[in-house]
Amino acid sequence: MGVARRPLWLLIFGTFTGLAFLFLSDRSKFELDLSRWHRPLVSLPNHGKPSRPRPLNVGSLAQDEQILQDLQLGAGYEYRRLCFDVRPVEGLSRTSLEEVSASLLNGNTIEGLKADGDLLPCSASVRIDVPYFDPHPVQDTSELMLGVATTLKRIDESLPAMSRFLAYSGTPLLVLLLDVPDLNTSNDQITTLRAKAQALGIEAIYVSFQPTVRETQGTMNFALAEVLHQNRQPSTKWFGVMDDDTFFVSLPPVLDALALYNPEREWYVGALTEGLFRIAQEGFKAWGGAGFFVSPPLMQKLADNSERCRVLDRGWGDLLWRDCILEITSPPVKLTQMSGLHQIDLWGDVSGWYESGWTQVLTVHHWKSWHYHSVPLAHEVTDIAGPDSFLQRYLFDDNVVLTNGYSIVHYPNGLPDLNKTELTFTEEVNVVVKPPETELMHSFGATRPALKVGKDKISWKFEYSTQGSGGSVRTFYVKRGGPDGGQDSLIELDWKRIS
């Protein structure tokens, strides 16, 4: 993010808004159980890691009671349940929209359930084909080393979410603790953090930060260059820089994308933000929250010139990374764009982004700051359906689109043009007028106006996920009745691998 991005009062407002979502939302209570976020993987023989934990084995009645207690539905809610038999298929690729020959809303409806009643089982299943993935992967992404500059409190809050993609992966996470000038002075807190990371299967490296007289967000973030280089592992072929609210859907596809480039040469790989407004302000650079990648030779050059580059600081980390790279390389190493890295510099109703039908999603940013969506919890379905199923759109016969892990949307007056992104969001907080189509065309393509909610578009939003019996994952989508006393509606989608 850049110097002219937002005035200070907007930064403070955005931070306060994100914290309000985190601490005041009822859904935040779903994030307290670390085991719920931890993606279990088999051990790597050379890492000495524990074997894959078995799925939760709880009675369905007790589990249903817990689910309903957490969802806090009103009395007499409407309930539907649909079960999916997931079949991974060799050679199948992710698409923007998959058609399913079944109805999601028609039939299978039970009304008037009490909030403390148990949920009825599925009467039938629908087969869903997904791109092939190994359900028991020996995941070794040790060629990638990630770095984040943050505080003790924020990394403590972020580790459970990060375990969804880092657990037992072999990828080390270097944490530059901006509020810890000496690890020894915070020994108890560091010991607790180390134990937490170890319990989550994360290989964490904690480094203290010694501030100089003048530090900005830019210089503090850029300090990662030196410590990443100093802590390079023998297996490291790529360095990745992220924010503490950056979520990687899966690390192996990231390395697959980086395989196009020779890591023994100088590379700077990342993605632009969504809107041309910010690009015009800050220039052609990798936006840090989406995640960006630097090859070891370039990282060494950045580390060697870190002090020299401090004078280039304009207040923001990703600007300083870009400016330093251009300053110290000849010919200049310019940004190489990678698709699938998503900054999401968007405000308001971001459903249009999530429901766009992306063909590749490597990262999601701002999910717990500029907006709130429990991405780590929604990500649990990938344990059954694979990483390509996350945010995959499925079109059902009854004008219903499931965006897996985000929403179920019924279009009662007919389907809109699903090839176009619904323009539900703005680029700035408190801005009501939507940006012009050309402003976002480079990232979204063509857009369409937002539909009238409740009339042209009826939505159930993802709120809950849990492991079910027999190795299944149960996901729950809710449409709240609202203050006018309308009936709450709950749709349960169960996912189970059949081969």
Image (cartoon, helix red, strand yellow):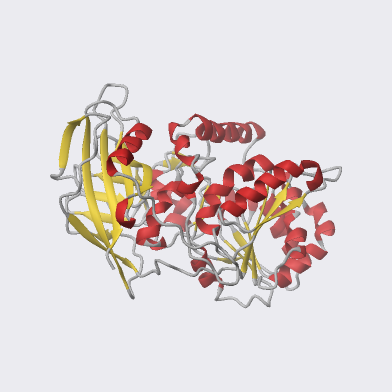
Q: Residue at x 52, y 58 (%)?
A: 165
Q: Does the image show residue 243?
A: no
| Residue 89 placement: quadrant | bottom left
| Residue 358 placement: quadrant | bottom left
Q: Position of residue 241 (x, y in %)?
A: 64, 58
Q: Position of residue 298 (x, y in %)?
A: 72, 69
- Please state if 141 lies on the left or on the right of 115 as rendered: right
Q: Residue at x 86, y 42 (%)?
A: 213
| Residue 323 placement: quadrant | bottom right
Q: Position of residue 486 (x, y in %)?
A: 24, 26
Farthest-out residue, right: 213
Q: Residue at x 59, y 66 (%)?
A: 48
Give above or below for 2 relative to 455. Answer: below
Judge by depth and name the residue closer to the eye, 40 or 20: 40
Q: Position of residue 495 (x, y in %)?
A: 30, 55
- Please state if 13 lies on the left or on the right of 498 as rendered: right
Q: Does the image show residue 233?
A: yes
Farthest-out residue, top: 484
- Please state if 49 lies on the left or on the right of 137 as rendered: right
Q: Residue at x 76, y 59 (%)?
A: 227
Q: Quadrant of the C terminus?
A: bottom left
- Please state if 65 lies on the left or on the right of 51 as rendered: left
Judge by depth and name the residue closer to the eye, 195 or 347: 195
Give above or below for 341 relative to 455. Answer: below
Farthest-out residue, left: 107
> How many numbered callouts?
0
Judge by depth and name the residue closer to the eye, 336 or 65: 65
